[in-house]
Every structure is written in C-alpha cells, then in structure tokens.
Image: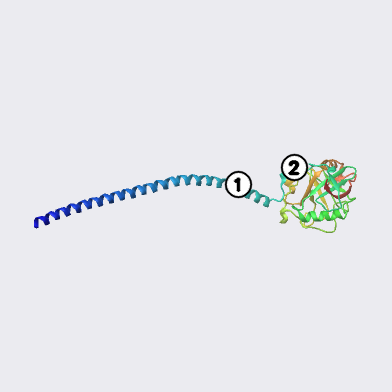
Amino acid sequence: MSNKRYSNKGVNSAARAQATAAAEQESKRQSMIVCIVAIAVVVLAVILALVLGGVDKNTTADNKTTTAATTTTSTTTTGSADKNADMTAIKAEIDSKEAADFVETTEVTEYVKLTVKHYGDVVIRLRSDIAPITVANFQKLVGEKFYDGLTFHRIYKGFMIQGGDPKGDGTGGSGTTIKGEFKINGVQNDLSHITGVISMARRSTPYDSATSQFFICNADASGNLYGKYAGFGYVVAGLDVVLTVSEVEVTAKVPGGEQSLPVEPVYIEKICFVNPK
C-alpha cells in the first residue's frame, strides 16, 4: 500500500511539474503576445505620428501663409485707417482728364469747374473724405456763386495761385470762418501739397481762420505746408491753365514786398458743379 502511495505521489509530482511548465510556457507565450502587441502599438503610434506630423507641418505652413497674408492685410488696413489720403492714387489722378470730359450740373457734386477768364477751365475734385468741413464750406460758396467774378489776387510762380477774396487784396472773406482741418490743429489730413492740390488760405493765427480764400499749388510744396494748411482736393483736368496763369507778370504790393500781385487782374469767371460725362 505504501509503495503504491509513493508511486502515486511521484506521478502527482510529475503532473504538477508538467502543469507548472505548461503554465510557465503559457505565461511566456502571453507575455510575448503582450510584447508583440505593445511593439505593434508603438510602431503604429510612430507611423501615425509621422503621418500626422507631416499633415501638421503642411497645415502649419498654410497657416503661416494665411497668417502672413492676414498680417499684410491687417497692415494695409491699418495703414489705410491711419492715412486718409492715398497720395500714389492721387498723383495718378491729377490732370488725368480733360475739361471736356465733364458736364455742368445744378447738383452739388464732388467736382467743380473753375473758369479762368481768357485762360480756360480747371476741373477740381473735392475730397470730403479728407477734409469734410472745408469741402462743405467750399461747396456752399460755389452754390451761392460767391466766387464768380473774383480774382486770383496773389500769383507766385513755383508756389501757388491764390484767389477767393471779395476785396481782392488778401484781407477779405465770406464772413464765416471754419475749423482748420490739418495736423497742427489736431485734425488728420494726409493730402500733401503737391502740384495741382487745392488748399485753404488762412491767417497765421488762429488756426480756425480759413474763410473763402483758397490756393492751388503750381509746384510741390509739401515740406513747407504739410500739416499746416487744409488741402481739400486737386486738379483732375486743366492743370496747364494753372501753370499758364502762374506765368503772368507780377509786381509787389509795397516796395520790397513779395512779387505776387498780378499787373493785370486774373479773373475767376465762375466756379460751378460738374459731373463726369
């Protein structure tokens, strides 16, 4: 009996050993499977990272382009907001048309035709987006025919021709003064005083002393006038008339004074509103 028990014990031990070995083998197999799966997951993650990384890189590049474009647009927009006069466009528009391209109208428009007696027509575009108060005042006076029959009482070659004074000597006006729309008076006005630009004359002080007198530049004078006088439009047709008038014979009002008083009066026959045909 005892031998049989010992024999069974040996058998049982062998079975247990075999079971243990099988369990260890199964455990190793499962561990290997886990490792393989883990490796596969890592590899898959790396592949996905590379793929997605490539997409992200392209997207970033697109975003950079978009950002750059947005920045440029923003800069341009900011620039436009900071400046109310596009001088490149204005230079291209000055004297780009003919007086015959416009027709008279009774409506208040942004274009006026100034007829200089014996010399010809000058068409001026008024820019209310740059100097609204000044333009409104000028349009009011044109509508009232205030300027008809007045003179260019001050003509200075290489600078400007000035008119709009009912007294004809530089001391008169319409009886109403307006806000000076220029930088040193706290108003943004980026219209440079280049050849062909029309601007308001005024006293040295106060700044809000402009009334009816205006001048048209016959040369570039931006450095002297920028930010100090209210430019409010420019000649789009008939600049040759302005330049011809600038050549008239002048003298001084007083001995030793400025040589700018025309020997023969230069009359503004009329100023009226016009529209492009």
In the image shown, does 261 or 214 lie closer to the viewer? 214
**Residue 146's spot in the image, x, y percent?**
87, 54
In the image shown, does 84 or 201 lie closer to the viewer? 84
Would you say 180 lies left or right of 168 here? left
Q: Please, what is the three-letter code of the amino acid marked with disc 1?
A: Ala
Secondary element under disc 1, as helix, strand or loop, is helix
Query: From this viewpoint, is residue 244 visible?
Result: yes
Query: From this viewpoint, is residue 206 visible?
Result: no
Q: In this view, does 270 lie above or below 176?
A: above
Q: Residue furthest left?
A: 2
N-terminal label among 1 and 2: 1
Quadrant placement of the N terminus:
bottom left
Q: Please, what is the three-letter code of the amino acid marked with disc 2?
A: Ala
Q: Which mark is residue 92?
A: 2
**Residue 41's spot in the image, x, y percent?**
39, 48
Secondary element under disc 2, as helix, strand or loop, is helix
**Residue 85's spot in the image, x, y percent?**
72, 49
Q: Which residue is drawn at 9% across and 57% down?
A: 2
Would you say 187 lies left or right of 141 here? left
Q: Residue 69 carries which label?
A: 1
Q: Residue 155 carries which label?
A: none
